[in-house]
Image (cartoon, grey):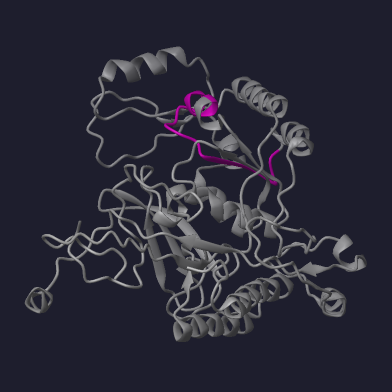
Amino acid sequence: MPIVQARGGSVRKAKKITVKTSLNNPYIIKWHTLERDDMHFILQTLEERIKHIGLKKIETRRRKKRSVAKRQIKEKCDASDCSVLPKEKEIDHIQQEQGWTDLNVRKQLAIGINEVTRSLEKNELLLVLVCKSAKPTMITMHLIQLSASRAVPAGQVPRLSESIAPMLGLTSVLALGFKKNSDTFTEVVEAIIPRIPSLDVPWIHHRSEQHTAEAYTDPLEIQDTELMETSAEEFPQSHKWKRTERNKSDSSNVTLQALRIKKLVPNPNKIRKPPKNKKAASK
Amino acid sequence: MSAQVKDKEAFQRLSFLYQAAHCVLAQNPENQELARFYCHMQRSISRRLVLRQDPSVKRTICKFCSSLLVPGISSTVRQRRCSGRRWSVIRCLCCGQTKRFPSNPAYKLWAEQPEALLENQPQTGERRQVPRRSPQHIRPKPPL
């Protein structure tokens, strides 16, 4: 029906492209772009701090030459305790000290997306930094809502992975979190926090925002003040939420986001199943 | 196709229910049932009227129990490696159902590509070989 196929002689160019309307997400959840100065500042402070502490993970690459690993050990000139991480598949003849150089410092950081997610769920973090180079972007998008619900500042820094991963001796650092019990990183955290733009998730904290992107209707305003006030007062200290003081006093408006509709054109390169026999028989 | 959208009220209703479910969870994260009811309503409306929803909306609703999946509150999100590939695994805390999405950096949903939108519709031009995620209508046509 949509695109009529040319049959032999008569070529009908009735190209009706069916357009499908789909309900688009009313919330646009994305990271905020950080300013250049802020980005540089954050990266520099982090690098200085890490170099100062000398935190690094020494890991032997299984497939690479062993001389590389030997060189790493020789360059590291720290006498702190190193733990030997048991690697089951490792058949190394060389007895080297592998693992993190400083375990205490390592415990104050949450490195890696899974670890950051887990510690956010347990409310252990003070600050979250995410790398912008994550592809696909879906792997870090859940951190926005998660950290907004816990009221933890979170920022996306463009070159986090490129600068910090080699310093720590890792392949890539897509997410970095500073735990609440960290004493070595407290000044760094305090310096970075004011530089990070606050995340706005419209349905959390009920900040009234008008989204007019692709709006086909006018935004309706619904005042849920009564509901908000009563529920805010009686609300117990839940593990999952961090209630801020200002929520109780504000007459918070919950703005209904505008209806957003996407009009989609079917994919011409869509992989379709081969037609069954009855279709061929009817033609 | 007319400029007006058919079933606009239905879409508004869907959007409203979706936002209401979010607000319900924002106010009281323990009350999953109401959010589930709203999403269930949303799903039945779209099923009855055959309305299409964006993948970003459908990904946040559990397919099994139709509760709203909010990372940290009603779902856990992990990056896992399974059979050599890296997946994003979203697990609904209410029913335990998992959704898995492969983390392929080269892949982009057809709905997210700019050429899919009607406004940016070019007449010709190469399009990427991208399979559609959730085809609601499988048109019985031979491939072009």
Magenta extent: A163-182
The C terminus of chain A lies in which quarter of the figure? bottom left
Q: Quadrant of residue A279?
A: bottom left
Q: Give left or right: position of B132 versus B38.
A: left
**Front residue of this view, candidates A256 and B128:** B128
Above or below, A187 relative to A141: above
**Front residue of this view, candidates A52 and A232:** A232
Q: Residue at x 74, y 73 (%)?
A: B27
**Front residue of this view, candidates A11 and B11:** A11
The N terminus of chain A lies in which quarter of the figure? bottom left
Q: Give left or right: position of B107 versus B2.
A: left
Q: Residue at x 72, y 24 (%)?
A: A37
Q: Residue at x 52, y 20 (%)?
A: A79
Residue A27 drawn at (x, y percent): 63, 61
Q: Give left or right: position of A241 versus B142.
A: right
Furthest residue toward front: A10
